[in-house]
Image (cartoon, grey):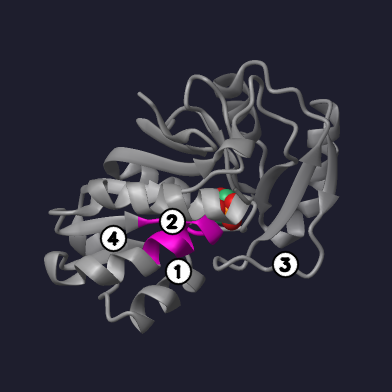
C-alpha cells in the first residue's frame, strides 16, 4: 500500500471516534483531509467543527460542515489530528503544515486527542523530523541563536507565514530524549509563539495505518 492509501485507511477508521460527537476538533494536513472528506457522510450527525487552520476551515465549509469558534464551544469531546512523528508514549512532533499553534490550543481544550497517522510517523525517539517552532517575526534571529545553544540547527521556512502571522523555524539535528523538558525550554524563549513538541499534552490514542491494518496505541 502507498503512504496515501495508509493515510486514507486510518482516516476511515477514525470516523468511529467522530460519530455521535456534537462538535469535533479538527486538525490539519493530508491525513486529516481524508478524514474531512469522510465526515461528509456523517455531517447530519454533527453540529460543527472547531478547525485548526484556514486550510481545514475551507475544506470543512466546502462540505457544508459549520466551523465554530472555540470561544463559543468550550471543552471539546474529541480532537482528531495527524502528526509528523509519534513516540511510544504518544508524544508528538507536529507543525509540518505550520498549524502547530492552533493545533496545540485545540488539543489542550479537548478531552480526548485521537492522533491519526501512517506507520512512517512512528519513531522511538523524537527529532528525526525537523522540529517546527513558530516565532514572532522580529524575534526570528534571536530565537534561532537560542535554539543553536540547545544543540539544534534552525532553518527559516522562508515564504511561510502562519495563520497567526508568525514565521517558522525548522530545527534539525535535535535528539529529543526528554520531550517535556525540551518543550518547556523552547516555550520559554522570548519570541516563541509555540513549539511543535506535543509532550505536555500528548495524544490519548494513536491510530496507526500499517500494512497489517490499523493499529491502536492506547
Ligand atoms: C500540521 C501538522 C500535521 O498534522 C502533520 O504535518 C502531518 O501531516 P500529514 O497528515 O500531511 O502527514 O502538524 O501542522
Q: Identify which residue is drawn at 20% across, 66% down.
A: 42
Q: Identify which residue is drawn at 34% across, 39% down.
A: 113
Q: Position of residue 154 (x, y in %)?
A: 83, 43
Residue beneath disc 2: 27
Q: Pointer 4: residues within 10 angstroms few (<14), some, or many (20+)?
A: some
Q: Is residue 47 covered in magenta?
A: no
Q: Do the residues labelled 4 and 2 touch (CB within 8 Å)?
A: no
Q: Do the residues labelled 4 and 3 touch (CB within 8 Å)?
A: no
Q: Pointer 2: residues within 10 angstroms few (<14), some, or many (20+)?
A: many
Residue beneath disc 1: 56
Q: Mark 3 or mark 1, which has the lower sequence index?
A: 1
Measured in 3D between alpha carbons, the distance from the residue under mark 3 to the one under mark 1, in whole angstroms, is 17 Å
Q: Is mark 3 within 8 Å of ligand 1?
A: no
Residue beneath disc 4: 70
In the picture, measured across the screen, residue 145 lies left or right of residue 49, that is right
Compared to residue 116, the image places residue 96 above or below, namely below
Tell me the tag on residue 160.
3
Q: What element carries label 2?
A: loop
Measured in 3D between alpha carbons, the distance from the residue under mark 4 to the one under mark 2, in whole angstroms, is 13 Å
Is residue 73 or residue 115 the one in the foreground?
115
Amino acid at each position: 500500500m502507498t503512504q496515501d492509501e495508509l493515510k486514507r485507511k486510518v482516516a476511515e477508521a477514525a470516523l468511529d471516534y467522530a460519530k455521535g460527537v456534537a462538535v469535533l476538533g479538527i486538525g490539519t494536513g493530508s491525513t486529516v483531509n481524508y478524514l474531512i472528506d469522510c465526515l461528509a457522510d456523517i455531517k447530519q450527525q454533527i453540529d460543527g467543527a472547531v478547525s485548526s487552520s484556514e486550510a481545514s476551515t475551507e475544506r470543512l465549509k466546502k462540505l457544508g460542515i459549520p466551523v465554530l469558534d472555540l470561544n463559543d464551544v468550550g471543552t471539546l469531546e474529541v480532537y482528531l489530528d495527524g502528526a509528523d512523528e509519534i513516540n511510544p508514549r504518544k508524544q508528538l512532533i507536529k507543525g509540518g503544515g505550520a498549524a502547530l499553534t492552533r493545533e496545540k490550543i485545540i488539543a489542550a481544550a479537548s478531552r480526548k486527542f485521537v492522533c491519526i497517522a501512517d506507520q512512517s510517523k512512528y519513531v522511538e525517539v523524537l527529532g528525526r523530523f525537523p522540529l517546527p517552532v513558530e516565532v514572532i517575526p522580529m524575534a526570528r534571529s534571536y530565537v534561532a541563536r537560542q535554539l543553536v545553544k540547545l544543540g539544534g540547527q534552525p532553518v527559516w521556512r522562508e515564504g511561510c507565514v502562519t495563520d497567526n502571522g508568525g514565521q517558522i523555524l525548522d530545527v534539525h539535528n535535535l535528539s529529543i530524549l526528554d520531550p517535556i523538558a525540551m518543550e518547556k525550554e523552547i516555550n520559554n524563549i522570548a519570541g516563541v509563539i509555540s513549539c511543535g513538541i506535543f509532550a505536555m499534552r500528548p495524544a490519548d490514542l494513536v491510530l496507526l495505518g500499517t500494512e497489517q491494518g490499523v493499529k491502536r496505541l492506547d
